[in-house]
Structure formats: C-alpha cells, structure tokens
C-alpha cells in the first residue's frame, strides 16, 4: 500500500546517509560554505546572534570582533548536518578514533553513589552526537527532549539519538518517568541552556543578565539527592572532545525557593564558563533572554 509518510521518511534518512558518504575534508568545506551563506541570507538569526553576543561580550569585544565570531558560529552550525550523516556510518569500534573523553572518573564516581545521575548539558559543538559519548561511557542513559513539530523529522532524530541505546523521554509530563529512572540508579540528561516561559523556570544570571532558566534539574536534584555532572561536547580539528566536569555540589536549606534559584544559578555558571572557552560553538541564534521577569500585579516590579 502506498504510504507517503514512510516514503518521505526513507528519503530524508537516505539524504542524511548520502551526506555521510562525502569525504570529511570536503564535508568540512561544504559546511563552512553553507554556514557562510546562512550568515549572509538569514538576517533574523544573524541579528539574534549579534545581539546575544553583544549582550554577553560587549565590554570585552569590539563590534568587529563580535561580527567575526558570529560568522564562526554560523560556520559551525553548517557542519552539524554533515557530521550527523557521517556519524550514521560509524560503528562502536570506530568511536575512539574520533571521540576523546575527559573527566570520565567524575561520571563513574557519581554513578557509583547509587542515586542515579543528572547530566547537565547544553547545545555545544554538535550536541546531536552526544549519544555516541554516552554509549562510550557505558551506563544506561535517558535524555529529556522536546519533540519536533514536524513528525517525520522528529522520528528521524529519535532514530539518530537513540540508535546506541539512549532512551528518549518527551518533556511533556516527564517528571514521573525521570524520578523512576533515578530511583533505579539510571542516568538522565537534560539540556537547560535555552529560554523557557516564566512558569517553567527561575530568573538567574547568565552572562551578566537575568535569564529565565529551566528549574527542573534543580528540583530533581533537591528531591532525589542525585549528583549533577556537567557534560559538554566540542568540535576539535582532529575530531570531538567530550568533557565530564566535576560534580556540582547541592545547595539544600529549609528554603526551597532559594535552593532552586541557587542551584540553577550554579548550573548556569558552569554552562557560561564552558561557553567562554568555546564561544563560537554555542547556539547563539536562540533568543536566550526572550522571557522577561513576570509581574502578576500591574504597576509592580
């Protein structure tokens, strides 16, 4: 029976695999070229990136330096689709040729506590390849994600993210599944570096400005006592480097609200520190400061 959706899915998956056949050096040049075209053509996201970087580095960098950095951001984004296609051809035996892991002992020590682990991560480098790093680390991991609006693309990326055993947890009504995973000593990864609505987050500092930040990880850490370990993946000339950071200590007092804010602030600080080391590899085209502090009473701030 003719199934348009199934055919479309196979076409999309086939195109990705074709991109993966392009030699890496050629794919790198093509990625840079596409990134350059996007920089010139996508006025909306170019402006968002310039505004974000000016907000974050305006006192440290000139407008000319920021524009050069934005070009590099777009070039790095241009690499992602080619790298995903390339990764579809990788087998487990090839992982160590291309991926270097640092700080793995931080991860192992946290896991051995038996309380599960919360992996704090962000849209750094090519975050879609984190499933490979997770597979190399050797522990079962569930990742919280927001399903894509286009069903076929969502199905395709679910295949990419889960093909090495990573379990995907849709963000809607996810708390019960996450708590169950942590209770059984599993690992849960959460990206908290993007803007959320005021009712989903707390306002804490990020690059010197108040940003509405997902409070879910802080709530989970406080409730379960699960250790929080940062994990970031960046692109290097010779491949990729993943870094498991030191455990972020839990702040827990009698004041739940202050605890949530204090712990979320710690998480933002860790993400910011890593972005500062690799400023061209973060997702600056996102409106990180879009949500403004909520005021339920008119005339009051």
Image (tube, helix red, strand yellow):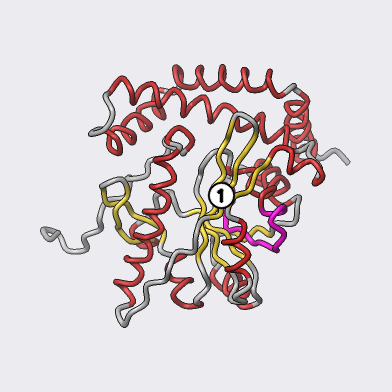
In this view, the residue in front, 3 or 123, is 123
- For residue 163: magenta? no
In this view, the residue in front, 144 or 138, is 138
Mark 1, other Cα within 10 Å: few <14 / some 14–19 / many ≥20: some
For the N terminus, the quadrant is top right
Decide if residue 249 is on the left or right side of residue 55. right
Within the image, what quadrant is residue 237 found in? Answer: top right
Q: Residue furthest right?
A: 1
At 56% from the left edge and 20% from the top edge, which residue is drawn? 32
Residue 125 locus on image (x, y percent): 54, 38
At 33% from the left edge and 34% from the top edge, which residue is drawn? 53
Residue 202 locus on image (x, y percent): 33, 61
Within the image, what quadrant is residue 197 found in? Answer: bottom left
Within the image, what quadrant is residue 30 found in? Answer: top right
Q: Residue furthest bottom?
A: 254
Q: Element under label 1?
A: strand
Q: In the displayed structure, would residue 93 be above or below residue 33?
A: below
At 26% from the left edge and 47% from the top edge, which residue is drawn? 208
Q: In the displayed structure, would residue 100 be above or below residue 19?
A: below
- For residue 146: magenta? yes
In this view, the residue in front, 238 or 252, is 238
Q: In the displayed structure, would residue 164 be above or below residue 77?
A: below
Q: In the displayed structure, would residue 156 be above or below residue 134?
A: above
Q: Residue furthest left?
A: 299
Decide if residue 287 is on the left or right side of residue 140. left
Residue 217 locus on image (x, y percent): 46, 65
For the C terminus, the quadrant is bottom left
Q: How many marks?
A: 1
Q: Which residues are magenta?
A: 134-147
In this view, the residue in front, 121 or 152, is 121
At 58% from the left edge and 39% from the top edge, which residue is drawn? 126
* Residue on which disc 1 sits: 243
């Amino acid at each position: 029976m003719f199934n348009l959706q199934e055919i479309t899915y196979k076409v999309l998956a086939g195109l990705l695999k074709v991109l993966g056949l392009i030699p890496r050096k050629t794919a790198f040049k093509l990625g840079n070229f596409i990134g350059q075209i996007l920089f010139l053509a996508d006025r909306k996201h170019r402006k968002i990136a310039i505004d974000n970087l000016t907000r974050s580095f305006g006192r440290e960098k000139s407008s000319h330096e920021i524009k050069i950095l934005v070009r590099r951001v777009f070039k790095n984004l241009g690499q992602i689709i080619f790298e995903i296609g390339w990764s579809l051809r990788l087998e487990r035996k090839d992982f160590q040729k291309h991926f270097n892991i640092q700080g793995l002992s931080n991860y192992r020590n946290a896991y051995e506590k038996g309380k599960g682990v919360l992996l704090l991560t962000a849209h750094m480098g090519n975050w879609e390849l984190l499933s490979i790093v997770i597979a190399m680390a050797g522990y079962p991991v569930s990742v919280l994600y927001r399903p894509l609006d286009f069903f076929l693309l969502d199905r395709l990326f679910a295949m990419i993210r889960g093909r090495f055993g990573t379990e995907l947890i849709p963000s809607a009504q996810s708390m019960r599944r996450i708590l169950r995973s942590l209770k059984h000593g599993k690992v849960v990864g959460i990206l908290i570096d993007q803007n959320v609505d005021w009712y989903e987050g707390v306002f804490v500092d990020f690059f010197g400005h108040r940003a509405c930040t997902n409070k879910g990880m802080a709530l989970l850490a406080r409730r379960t006592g699960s250790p929080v370990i940062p994990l970031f993946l960046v692109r290097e000339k010779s491949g990729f480097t993943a870094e498991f950071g030191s455990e972020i200590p839990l702040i827990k007092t009698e004041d739940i609200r202050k605890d949530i804010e204090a712990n979320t602030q710690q998480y933002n600080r860790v993400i910011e520190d890593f972005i500062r080391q690799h400023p061209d590899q973060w997702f600056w085209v996102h409106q990180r400061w879009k949500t403004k502090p909520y005021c339920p009473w008119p005339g009051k701030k």
